[in-house]
Image (cartoon, rainbow, N blue to C red):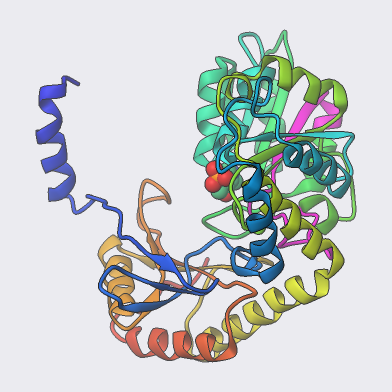
Amino acid sequence: MKIKDIPQKLADIRREDRFRAVHDLRMITASRGVDRSGKEYIVFNSNDYLGMTHEKEVEEAARNAVIYGTGSGGARLTSGAVFELSDLEKEIARFKHKEDAVIFNTGYMTNLGVLYALAGPGDVIFSDELNHASIVDGCRISRAAGKVYFHSDMGALEKLLEETPCQGQRFIVTDGVFSMDGDVADLPGLVKLKEKYDAFLIVDDAHATGVIGNTGRGTAEYYHMEGIDLQVGTLSKSLGAEGGFAAADRTITDYLRNCSRPFIFSTSISAVTGATALAALKLLEENPEKYMGALRRNTKYMKEGLTKAGISFLPGDTSIIPIVMGREEAAMEYAARCKERGILLSAIRPPSVPKGTSRIRLTVTAAHTRAELDKALEVMIDEIQGTRPVSPT
Ligand SMILES: *Cc1c(COP(=O)(O)O)cnc(C)c1O
């Protein structure tokens, strides 16, 4: 594409009704936001699963850390080596039952940084077809061969493992909780195959940390098993901050600090951000029942309310509730009508999801009050006439 062709490309995007723009939203609580006109919304498309972004103790930790600078001033290997990030790495390693952890600036950069550093020509990466875009992009820049298997299909994965020649290292990479469907990866199946085929297993628990497992440790805890070689996660969802992490054996984390370009060549997140995530992790560990209990109760209440009204959604053990509408316009129009009435939901359409499965994606958090859930149910049920969702298959 030539730069002079961009106006035409943009016109095509607009004609197909795919043009996207940022709509400013200021979160005034963990579940409510206002736009520039002052209109208030109850927010059901946030990843702030535990409401940590507005917890008093977390806010206070952020305020206290600001005396160490509003920015970190450099990369971790130079002047950006703030105490809070090393402390956080220790805490995350302990929480995830790993020897060590490395903090990256975002979850997205973590997947790029891990796959770029560990995989290369001669290696093969086996990747679930529904994996997050950052895993897809990490596979691309690694220059390893990529093999995509049907979603959570262990038979298909085994067949690929068997028939794909590999002189180097095999990697299996998967989301722990899949972001658009809200289902959990088949960890027992993956561990069995990674052992049989001597593969290195990477699980990205961005949507699983703080959400599944009794204490929020994620996919491994959900199945009461270990076996994940490298655990990717984010500080930006249940931990109320921004940043990502990779937790693994120390040889791996040392190697990442030495050879992962997104770690080496980018200014680190600040002491404020580190202190925020540390405080959120501490709250979660001290009182998993308070946060995860609220998340589970709210999710159950929402799912029961929808079911009672005859609104079906994809099943799953998480607080991601996908209501499949089929046509793109149906999902877009429904989300727009709910927004008009103060309820923010996401309409998800291709290429994020397969054609014909455009959907409403609603995330419940621990921070929603009963009144907010009731309001959302009232609006969603009221607006559903004429746009019956497709039954999950
Ligand atoms: C959200 C998400 C990421 C990206 O994390 P950020 O911290 O937002 O960059 C990576 N992987 C998965 C599976 C995600 O859901």
What residue appears at the point 83 percent right and 23 percent down from the top-left corner? 198
* Residue found farthest to the front: 67
Q: Is residue 298 magenta?
A: no
What residue appears at the point 56 percent right and 43 percent down from the top-left corner? 70
Q: Is residue 76 above or below residue 388?
A: above
Question: Looking at the image, which is closer to me, 320 or 168?
Answer: 320
- Residue 179: x and y, percent? 56, 54
What residue appears at the point 61 percent right and 52 percent down from the top-left corner? 241
Question: Looking at the image, which is closer to me, 364 or 154?
Answer: 364
Question: Looking at the image, which is closer to me, 359 or 98?
Answer: 98
Query: Which secondary structure type mostly characterizes the magenta part of the structure?
Result: loop
Chain part drawn in magenta: 194-218
Q: Decide if residue 164 is in sight here.
A: no
Quadrant of residue 285 in the image? bottom right
Dividing the image into four quarters, tell me where ligand 1 lies: top right
What residue appears at the point 75 percent right and 52 percent down from the top-left corner? 278
Q: Is residue 58 left or right of residue 336?
A: right
Q: Is residue 178 above or below residue 200?
A: below
Q: Is residue 168 left or right of residue 289?
A: left
Quadrant of residue 317 in the image? bottom right
Q: Is residue 2 above or below residue 81?
A: above
Q: Is residue 211 magenta?
A: yes
